[in-house]
Image (cartoon, rainbow, N blue to C red):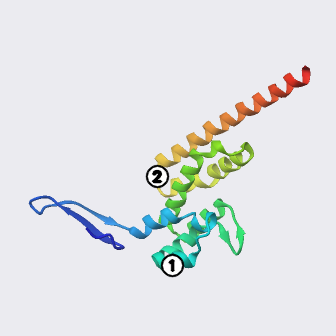
Amino acid sequence: MCCSQNRIITSKRSQYIPFRTKPFRTDIIVTSILHDCIEDTLLTKEMIVKEFGYKIANQVEDLTRVKNDKKISSAEIVKILYQQKKKELLLIKLFGRLHNIQTVGAKIPEKGWKTILETLQSFLTIATYLKVPRVARQLYTHCLNIAANYKKLNVLRVLQDKIFISE
């Protein structure tokens, strides 16, 4: 079995008949694993180049929100990747957002609202563009559920404030 970049991986049955043949893009798999490393860890582009090569390092850099020593929004990264027609990197960003929206409940509501709004405005459009309606539905459903939970939390806080004020 070979796992070098852009190779075909073929498993053989006992009679040497191909069991499964599938294109295998290791650069995209490695990039998806490393996509947040430059902005979230001490890992640098140079370290990625040394370990994985320029292609993966450039893809990871394209996905990072740190540009010219400033952190830009995920929506801005999505816009840049869309303009450059980098569909594979958009897909990585989209699945990263799906994971983020699944765990956004751990954030304070103010940050959660920002993530929900950005998801609805940018990432649903990208999911449609990439023709992954199931992901779009999951994003939308998670956003609605989280928004409903935040509203309930806000109502409970208001009620709690009123109870303590009236005592």
Position of residue 121 measured from the top left corner of the image (x, y, whole percent): 64, 52
Q: Residue furthest top?
A: 167
- Decide: few, some or many residues near mark 2? Use Cα within 10 Å; few <14, some 14-19, many ≥20: some
Mark 2 and mark 1: Cα distance apart in space: 31 Å
Left or right of 27? Residue 68 is: right
Q: Residue furthest left?
A: 15
Given residues 38 and 154, the one toward you in this image is 38
Mark number for residue 146? none
Check disc 1 and report its element: helix, strand or loop.
Answer: helix
Q: Quadrant of the C terminus?
A: top right
Left or right of 140? Residue 72 is: right
Question: Disc 2 marks which residue?
Answer: 132
**Amino acid carrying mark 1 in the image:** Val
Identify the residue at image location x=67%, y=38%: 147
Identify the residue at image location x=68%, y=46%: 107
97 versus 21 height, above or below: above
Identify the residue at image location x=31%, y=72%: 7
Given this view, does label 2 or label 1 mark the residue nearer the observer? 1
Q: Are marks 2 and 1 in contact (CB under 8 Å)?
A: no
152 versus 75 height, above or below: above
Question: Disc 1 marks which residue?
Answer: 49
Left or right of 125? Residue 109 is: right
**Amino acid carrying mark 2 in the image:** Val
Position of residue 144 measured from the top left corner of the image (x, y, whole percent): 62, 38
Position of residue 14 measured from the top left corner of the image (x, y, whole percent): 11, 58
